[in-house]
Image: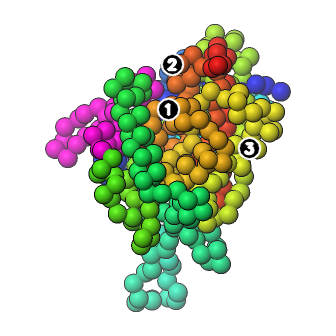
């Protein structure tokens, strides 16, 4: 069976909802990163066998196909859009890996999201010529009998279960911002980000190339002063939660043999992926069984892993996962996470994979896990290995 490897990984900078990417539709900037990811490794359009993208909030049908066409790929190139909520980007890369394993062909995978352009859902009229105004529908992640607990309350549930204080959450959020600040000062993300030409409200064209969600100057006192937003007398605040964002990322996946034939450097081999289900009310704990499962199935241990990226939906959620898995702080989200850079839902997983691949290269390390909790009660985890990397001691 073919060994799937990633040879190119590109992302946009992450914009705030209503921010720098608001003048574009999600297929536009996802098309841009698809084009750039292919150009960086000189892949011709005719050689792309499939495009697999995650997306959860678009008004476009099968945005992977729309993005592929916008990127200039041939009309014979198919596209597949998947929705596993926050795990969509990782899952898209996983599906591309499976495709490569069985076919030996080249795929582009990733995710795109625009929380700026999220459409409203309206219920249809109950009867012809109904004069009552239409009802807005929620984007429920569970059936009615499961109560569809809001995401913020699932974080409160974990904070209560694991006795995670507001002070601990605020400290984690502050550290995420500080790690992100240091990474940006060191220009760690420059190589992985494609500048996107955007038009502002005055008609000026600018190049968006720096993540705009981080709050590098926030201090711990400001975080401590924020009030709980999801539950009275709760502990989860806006400062210890991820943001609402727009972004996209694209990765080129092919067989190791194909990469060798093309004389391409491998960013990382996709070793194994696991997906699990958990209680919806505690959805944030999903990375724990997902990471345990992926390690067990790959016959590996956490001691063999250099870096761990767990999506920071909420500080309470990551802290609960860290406690359960006993992850050393120095290997977790080393360049900051979604609390700092934001969480463009279906794009996040692909962005985290991109970030960690470049971080393995920067530190000359070998192996990483990328994981995310998933709304509705799931978890996903992927093991990646850089061929030239050295295991930390």
* Camera-nearest residue between 342 and 42: 342
Q: Which mark is residue 334?
A: 1
Please identify the quarter of the rendering in which residue 116 is found. bottom left
Name which of mark 3 and mark 1 comes first in the sequence: 3
User: Under tag 2, what secondary structure?
Assistant: helix
**Tag 2 near tag 3, CB within 8 Å:** no
Rounded to the nearest whole Å, what is the CA distance between mark 1 and mark 2?
12 Å
Mark 3 nearby-residue class (10 Å; few <14, some 14–19, many ≥20): some
Query: Marks 3 and 1, how far apart in space?
Result: 21 Å
Q: Is residue 273 above or below residue 135?
A: above
Q: Which residue is mark 3?
A: 292
Quarter occupied by the N terminus = top right
- Magenta stretch contains residue 217: yes
Q: Verify CB contact (< 8 Å) between mark 3 and mark 1.
A: no
Query: Which residue is at 64% across, 41% downward?
Result: 326
Tell me what residue is drawn at x 49 percent, y 32 percent. Answer: 334
Q: Position of residue 198 (x, y in %)?
A: 29, 38
Residue extent of the magenta highlight:
190-219
SS at badge 3: helix
Q: Which label sits on residue 88?
A: none
Disc 2: which residue: 362
Do the residues under discs 1 and 2 have CB atoms within 8 angstroms? no
Percent x, y of residue 100: 73, 30
Instruction: Tell me: 43 left or right of 223.
Output: right
Q: Position of residue 133 (x, y in %)?
A: 39, 84
Disc 2/disc 3 C-alpha distance (Å): 27 Å
Disc 1 versus disc 2: nearer the observer: 1
Q: Residues within 10 Å of mark 1 (few under 14, many from 20)?
A: many
Q: First in sequence, mark 1 or 2: give its number.
A: 1
Residue at image position (41%, 34%) is: 179
Question: Local crowd at mark 2 within 10 Å, few (<14), some, or many (≥20)?
Answer: few
Label the magenta part by its dominant secondary structure. loop
């Amino acid at each position: 069976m073919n060994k799937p490897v990633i040879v190119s990984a590109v992302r946009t900078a992450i914009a705030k909802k209503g921010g720098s990417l608001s003048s574009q539709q999600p297929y536009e900037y996802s098309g841009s990163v698809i084009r750039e990811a292919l150009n960086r490794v000189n892949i011709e359009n005719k050689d792309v066998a499939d495009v697999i993208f995650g997306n959860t909030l678009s008004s476009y049908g099968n945005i992977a196909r729309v993005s592929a066409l916008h990127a200039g790929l041939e009309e014979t190139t198919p596209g597949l859009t998947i929705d596993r909520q926050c795990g969509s980007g990782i899952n898209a890369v996983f599906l591309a890996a499976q495709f490569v394993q069985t076919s030996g062909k080249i795929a582009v995978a990733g995710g795109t999201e625009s929380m700026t352009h999220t459409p409203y859902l309206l219920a249809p009229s109950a009867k012809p010529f109904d004069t009552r105004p239409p009802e807005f529908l929620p984007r429920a992640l569970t059936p009615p009998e499961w109560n569809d607990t809001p995401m913020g309350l699932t974080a409160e549930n974990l904070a209560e279960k694991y006795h995670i204080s507001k002070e601990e959450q605020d400290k984690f959020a502050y550290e995420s911002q500080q790690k992100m600040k240091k990474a940006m000062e060191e220009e760690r993300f420059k190589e992985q980000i494609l500048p996107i030409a955007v038009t502002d409200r005055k008609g000026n064209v600018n190049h968006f190339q720096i993540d705009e969600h981080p709050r590098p100057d926030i201090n711990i006192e400001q975080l401590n002063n924020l009030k709980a937003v999801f539950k009275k007398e709760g502990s989860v605040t806006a400062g210890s939660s991820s943001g609402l964002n727009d972004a996209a990322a694209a990765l080129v996946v092919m067989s190791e043999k194909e990469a060798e034939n093309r004389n391409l450097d491998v960013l990382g081999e996709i070793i194994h992926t696991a997906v699990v289900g958990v209680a919806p009310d505690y959805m944030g704990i999903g990375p724990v069984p997902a990471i345990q499962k992926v390690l067990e199935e790959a016959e590996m241990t956490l001691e063999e892993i250099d870096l761990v990226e767990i999506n920071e939906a909420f500080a309470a959620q990551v802290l609960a996962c860290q406690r359960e898995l006993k992850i050393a702080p120095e290997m977790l989200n080393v360049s900051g996470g979604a609390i700092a850079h934001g969480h463009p839902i279906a794009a996040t997983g692909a962005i985290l994979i991109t970030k960690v691949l470049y971080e393995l290269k920067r530190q000359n390390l070998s192996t990483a896990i990328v994981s995310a909790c998933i709304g509705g009660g799931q978890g996903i985890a992927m093991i990646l290995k850089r061929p030239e990397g050295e295991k930390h001691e």
